[in-house]
Amino acid sequence: MPRRDFEDDPNAPKANSLVPAASVVVVDSDGRVLLQRRADNGMWALPGGKMELGESLGDCGVREALEETGIHIEITGIVGTYTDPGHVFAYDDGEVRQEFSICLLGRPVGGELRISDESSEVDWFTPDEVDCLPMVTSIRKRVNDWRCGRFPVIR
């Protein structure tokens, strides 16, 4: 389902849902970050998605990384919480979701890169390569927080 991101846009539609979600900065032994090009908006992003009933936040991050990238990961820490009410996602079905994401830190433990119905490309990037990729502001913020060693608790 296509999605459009609005960040601090006075013309953004009003949020009508709040869904807990996890994203993961997955870093390999060479210091590269795992990213996917989202099928719904064409932008590069961290693996992640909404938390399902019956799973922990860590389990959500592990599941989403595997589903979207083919990489098995383990969670090693937390980058921060991102709950900006000025950032909403509008979906074609009428849902307008307020951001509510906990960004975790992880490392790969197996698997092979593959795309999914949610990703059109998946690859590893050095932190410098990330700077040139099209990415929504909130995802770039998470990557930059990790890169700079800033691990905000509340955002």
Image (tube, rainbow, N blue to C red):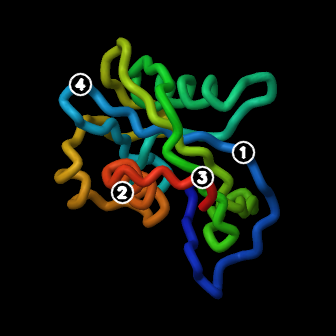
Residue that numbered label 2 is attached to: 144
Label 4 packing within 10 angstroms: few (<14), some (14-19), many (20+): few
* Separation of marks 2 and 3 at Cα, in angstroms: 15 Å
Q: In the image, residue 13 lies at what x, y percent?
A: 71, 76
Q: Earlier in the sequence, mark 2 or mark 1?
A: 1
Q: Earlier in the sequence, mark 2 or mark 4?
A: 4
Q: How many marks?
A: 4
Residue at image point 57% right, 59% down: 3
Residue at image point 43% right, 60% down: 141
Label 1 packing within 10 angstroms: few (<14), some (14-19), many (20+): some
Give the residue at the far top of this rendering.
Answer: 110
**Can you tell which mark lies on residue 29?**
4
Residue that numbered label 1 is attached to: 20
**Can you tell which mark lies on residue 153?**
3
Q: Earlier in the sequence, mark 4 or mark 3?
A: 4
Residue at image point 44% right, 66% down: 137
Disc nearest the viewer among 2 and 3: 3
Residue at disc 1, secondary structure: loop
Q: Earlier in the sequence, mark 2 or mark 3?
A: 2
Residue at disc 4, secondary structure: loop
Label 2 close to label 1 by CB (< 8 Å): no
